[in-house]
Amino acid sequence: MPMYSEEIIEEIRSRNDIVDVISSYVQLKKSGSNYFGLCPFHNENSPSFSVTRSKQMFYCFGCHMGGNVYTFLMEYNKCTFPEAVEELAGRCGYALPKQPMSNAQKKRQTKRTKLKNIYKDAANFYYARLHSSGGKAGMDYFRNNRNLDSETMKNFALGYADKKWDSMYQFLKQKGYEEEIMKDSGLVVFDEKKGPRDYFINRVMFPILDASGNPIALGGRVLDDSKPKYLNSRENEVFEKRNTIYGYNIAKRTRRDMFILCEGYMDVIALHRAGFDNAIAALGTALTKQHVKKLKDSHKKIYLCFDSDFAGVDAALRAIGMLRLLEVDCKVITMEEYKDPDEYIKAKGAEAFEERIKNAENSFLFSIRKRREDFDVNDPEENNRFFRNMAGRIITIPTEIERENYIVVLADMYNVSPDSLRELIRDVSKNKDELNAIEEEVYKGYRKSDFFNENDEPKVSTFPKKVDAKNKSKEGLKETEGILLTWLLDEPALYSAIKEYIDPMDFSEGLYRDIATEMFESLSEDKEFEPASIMCAFEDNEAHQEIAKMLHTKIEGLESKKDKETLLKETLIKLKNEGLNNVDKTKPGAGKRIRKIKEDIRNLRDIDLL
Ligand SMILES: [Zn+2]
């Protein structure tokens, strides 16, 4: 991974104003000295996402996501730090120096770059071919069979691979690509006898784009009913099916609070065409752990919209198990009577589909409804087994209140009394084997730990952590420190009035003390304190969030000068008292420090600061 020097990182950061950059992703409105918009990191209806030009920081008062312009890009595009640096360098026209890399890195890097380039060129070639006279077959297919307009074809960069067996090969050769990379890309197959042949012949083409919209693979579909219906270019350094979500590059900007997860490319495209910009599909035949983790990180609800055939229902049940295991809110949009969303929209239109979204079924109830079809409910014994299965499923629900809600709803739906259902639950819960089998069935054999066991540690949720009583006083203290730091950042002139009373050592050890040290140093030299710049010294985004949080502490009740004086004094006294606790009494000079703090506290009570 390329590393850039601090100077370069800072130069690029300062050339990219955070308000300008974020505006191209989030609609912002000016309010006072801040800009506000709907947070792209959590679901909300009223804006609590703020961007401040003077601080060059963003911060969400709802989910506490925050940081500088790099943090934003990394979180928004789910990219690495070097990638964020590269993107911003490109944005401001900064020429990054070539990186000294190891040979292995160089090889990998150049291969990645070559692959990305070849897919980009190939996608452009197929797109141009679709729009040429030779592309009529593909164009007819998209227009007549799929009812697509030019805009949709452009948005998804759709294309056409013609009937000649070496169009792509000739194009790539003329572009100067080596045979090695053609082979690795999977676009050309080298046959010992027949020589080079295109992998995609007479197919409509669907480039597969990464989250930033770069082609990383190509998919092709036949125009008729011949087999195989779909082909994908091969997996390699830039493309892994298990990690890729089709349509995500567009859907990530949706205003809706949920994604519609469907089965294939055509479903996604048909839904986007009908105005549902939140449609996505997992690549490959089944949803993977990586897909599910990505969906969880998006903080969106997931509405499943799979085919209504047996395989589709099976895939939906599997997805529900995995999503529920990670506590992702999910529902099911049924396409019953129609095969898939594409067919449904063609027959009934977008409004009817919107109605189906509104009536989406609770995923837990869906699972039970589908499970019931496996039992002959006219046979009392089978019926009993069905209810035991239902009872076992209710036991898997983590909270008492939710379990109770489901008992009432299910008893009503399936005509049993809530009490007999409760009794059955007690009975099944005593039978460990039966319960394990049901759990296995619900979660499809997955355990929560399975999602986090590939060296990728569970990502710590960016939502406010539950604070237990022990941590509460610490949190309160940090708030006091945050008030002072935020205040000084907003009103640097205050520093001269209080500087003799404040010492970084009074702040909590760690980030708070580090930031206080940096800030007081800048202020004492009459220099501007730039938190967004300081942040770059901290590698992980969690530190960025913590810094953004401390520098966005809400300061309330400052109507008059007297209010200000009172709050400032209270804050300083609280801080000094904590400073007293921070003194390490085993160290030399401790006595002197304690005397100084006590004197400060006495003085603070008597004098006027402002
Ligand atoms: Zn938020």
Image: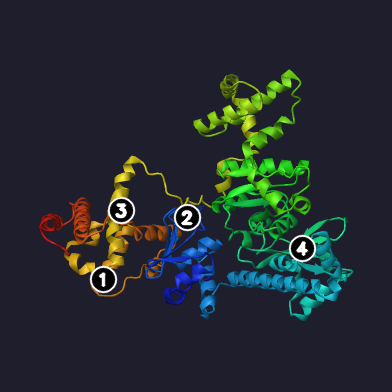
Q: Nearer the viewer, residue 515 or 498?
A: 498
Q: Nearer the viewer, residue 170 or 396?
A: 396
Residue 376: % across, % down: 76, 25
> Marks 2 and 4: CB-CB under 8 Å?
no
Asked if the beta carbon under badge 4 is closer than 8 A to the nearest atom of ligand 1, the reply is no
Mark 2 secondary-structure assignment: loop
Q: Nearer the viewer, residue 236 or 277?
A: 277
Camera-side mark, 4 or 1: 4
Q: Which residue is mark 2?
A: 46
Q: Earlier in the sequence, mark 1 or mark 3?
A: 3
Q: Amino acid at mark 3?
A: Glu
> Marks 4 and 1: CB-CB under 8 Å?
no
Camera-side mark, 2 or 3: 2
Mark 1 secondary-structure assignment: helix
Measured in 3D between alpha carbons, the distance from the residue under mark 1 to the one under mark 3, in whole angstroms, is 21 Å
Mark 3 secondary-structure assignment: helix
Q: Amino acid at mark 2?
A: Ser
Say above or below: 362 vs 509: above
Quarter of the picture containing the C terminus is bottom left
Residue 149: % across, % down: 75, 65
Q: Which residue is mark 4?
A: 148
Q: Earlier in the sequence, mark 3 or mark 4?
A: 4
Q: Which residue is mark 3?
A: 479
Q: Which residue is mark 1?
A: 523
Measured in 3D between alpha carbons, the distance from the residue under mark 3 to the one under mark 4, in whole angstroms, is 55 Å
Mark 4 secondary-structure assignment: loop
